[in-house]
Image: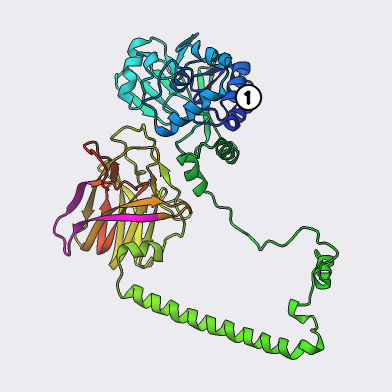
């Protein structure tokens, strides 16, 4: 039998319809929902009605429990609390009664399901770190278990070694001697990755688990939220800021003009679609305005010439100022190799405290010469080289300069939306070649998202790693950086001005667990 395992619909009708169509096309024979049908989204009634009609088994989630009064919502975030209290007003007594009767656990032939964990399903504990999956494996005997709740799709695996591991979502077949806890992700509130609806399929005959991730109409979802007056969600706003459709050509008017339009305009409409050898300025002007038109055209030409000369002057001045000496922070925006923008990287609020926010160094540069997940800037690309390599089983970033030059390597903006992180810890080690001479520094920059989609720099926290000269073969920093109250995003960077070669070991930027509060 082919099962569809869905979870965390959260009253998102657009996303649920997308998933329902997909699993129907794939001929899923039985649908199991792991809970949280309501909460957050604008359409609790419509989603509940659809789930009641089409889903074979629905479990109780913590938002469902709060929505029907089985649990209180005092531990919810303000955004979640507002949504669930507003949704209660929309649900009928029949809907509330159905929610109250939902089970906390479900068993099928060969696998079992819950919303949180299996140690105590009514407490809705989170399975996040691999170790938090151990109580569920001790409580149950099934080889395969499904849970939701965290919105993070993935697989927890334990084998003969007894050491649990977390694996990002991928299609797999159950193996003898291994046990699995699978999280299908969230249908209606996918706050991780590229914010796509996520669910999974399980074939009980072939023992295969497949993950599905689908885009949905998030624009319609935002509009529905606005109509309810419930505001927006940070993960949707972050996703929208990453979108940009390039204009390939100037937009003409394709609408029909009325009969009162000027004769010249109507003539242009008649000639649309036909190539014209005549330039626009070749149309004869009225005799009374011929001299004035000629003067205006000449004046127009002189204005353009003056603008070009001034532009060249400004460009030369900027280049001279640049070569006169600027900080490595300026280099990143003056000369990007290659010129591209990074998307923001969201940090899920339930991520393990020791999670590294930074992506690893890639094994190779991609086809366009990009450092996947990072961007970098050189002062003179003809005298500077960048690559990756393996040393002591660790991937390192290698930068080599023929002479003293500036370089800067930086991460994407790290989105802290939905978290309560008060401070971060940065750790990085850099090996210097014997020929090294110069200065190195690491920086953690704090930003605040603006209403227009830009980011305002709140504070730059640089750490000097090396003065002039090769004072140490290996330099490192291990520091805590408190966050300001307005901080919404972070950025890590490493760079400097030096001659010779450096090897940057994989840097770490994560939550500082000992933090107590943000700065004002």
Near-viewer residue (288 or 1): 288
Left or right: residue 38 versus residue 517 is right
Q: Up-down: is 159 above or below 418?
A: above
What's the residue at 34%, 26% (across, down)? 165
Residue 179 occupies quadrant: top left
Left or right: residue 260 versus residue 171 is right
Q: Could you tell me which secondary element the residue under label 1 belongs to?
A: loop
CA neighbours of label 1 inside 10 A, class few (<14), some (14 to 19), many (20+):
few
Near-viewer residue (365 or 371): 371
Which quadrant would the N terminus be assigned to in this image?
top right
- The question of residue 469 being in magenta is answered with yes
Residue 471 screen position, x and y as percent: 13, 59
- The question of residue 62 being in magenta is answered with no
Q: Range of the magenta residues?
A: 456-480
Question: Which SS does the magenta portion mostly show?
Answer: strand
Q: Mark 1 points at which residue?
A: 26
Q: Up-down: is 505 above or below 86?
A: below
Applied colour scheme: rainbow
Residue 178 screen position, x and y as percent: 38, 17
């Amino acid at each position: 039998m082919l099962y569809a395992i869905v979870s965390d619909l959260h009253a998102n009708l657009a996303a649920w319809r997308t998933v329902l169509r997909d699993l129907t096309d794939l001929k899923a024979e039985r649908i199991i929902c792991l809970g949280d049908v309501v909460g957050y989204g604008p359409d609790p009634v419509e989603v509940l009605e659809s789930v009641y009609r089409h889903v074979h088994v629905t479990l109780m989630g913590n938002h469902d429990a709060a929505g029907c009064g089985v649990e209180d919502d005092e531990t919810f975030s303000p955004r979640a609390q507002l949504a669930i209290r507003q949704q209660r007003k929309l649900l009928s007594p029949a809907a509330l009664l159905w929610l109250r009767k939902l089970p906390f656990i479900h068993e099928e032939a060969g696998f079992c399901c819950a919303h949180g964990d299996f140690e105590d399903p009514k407490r809705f504990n989170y399975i996040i770190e691999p170790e938090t999956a151990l109580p569920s494996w001790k409580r149950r005997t099934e080889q395969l278990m499904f849970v939701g709740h965290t919105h993070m799709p993935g697989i927890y695996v334990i084998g003969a070694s007894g050491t649990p591991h977390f694996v990002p979502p991928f299609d797999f077949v159950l193996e003898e001697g291994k046990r699995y806890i699978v999280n299908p992700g969230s249908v209606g509130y996918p706050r991780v990755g590229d914010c796509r609806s996520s669910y999974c399929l399980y074939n009980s005959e072939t023992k295969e688990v497949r993950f599905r991730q689908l885009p949905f109409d998030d624009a319609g979802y935002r509009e529905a939220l606005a109509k309810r007056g419930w505001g927006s969600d940070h993960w949707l706003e972050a996703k929208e800021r990453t979108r940009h459709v390039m204009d390939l050509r100037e937009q003409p008017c394709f609408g029909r003009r009325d009969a009162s339009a000027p004769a010249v305009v109507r003539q242009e409409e008649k000639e649309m679609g036909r190539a014209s050898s005549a330039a626009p300025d070749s149309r004869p002007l009225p005799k009374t305005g011929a001299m004035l038109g000629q003067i205006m055209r000449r004046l127009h030409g002189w204005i353009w010439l003056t603008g070009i000369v001034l532009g060249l002057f400004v460009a030369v001045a900027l280049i001279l100022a640049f070569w006169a000496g600027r900080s490595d922070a300026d280099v990143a925006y003056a000369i990007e190799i290659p010129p591209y923008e990074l998307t923001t990287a969201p940090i899920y609020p339930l991520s393990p405290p020791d999670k590294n926010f930074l992506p690893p160094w890639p094994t190779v540069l991609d086809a366009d010469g990009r450092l996947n997940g990072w961007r970098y800037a050189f002062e003179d690309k003809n005298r500077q080289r960048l690559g990756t390599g393996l040393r002591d089983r660790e991937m390192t970033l290698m930068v080599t300069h023929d002479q003293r030059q500036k370089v800067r390597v930086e991460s994407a903006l790290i989105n802290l939306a939905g978290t309560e992180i008060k401070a971060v810890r940065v750790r990085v080690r850099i090996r210097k070649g014997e020929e090294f001479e110069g200065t190195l520094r690491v920086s953690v920059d704090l930003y605040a998202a603006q209403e227009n989609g830009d980011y305002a720099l709140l504070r730059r926290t640089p750490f000097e790693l090396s003065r002039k000269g090769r004072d140490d073969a290996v330099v490192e920093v291990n520091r805590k950086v408190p966050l300001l109250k307005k901080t919404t995003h972070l950025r890590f960077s490493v760079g400097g001005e030096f001659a010779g070669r450096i090897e940057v070991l994989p840097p770490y930027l994560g939550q500082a667990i000992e933090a107590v509060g943000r700065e004002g």
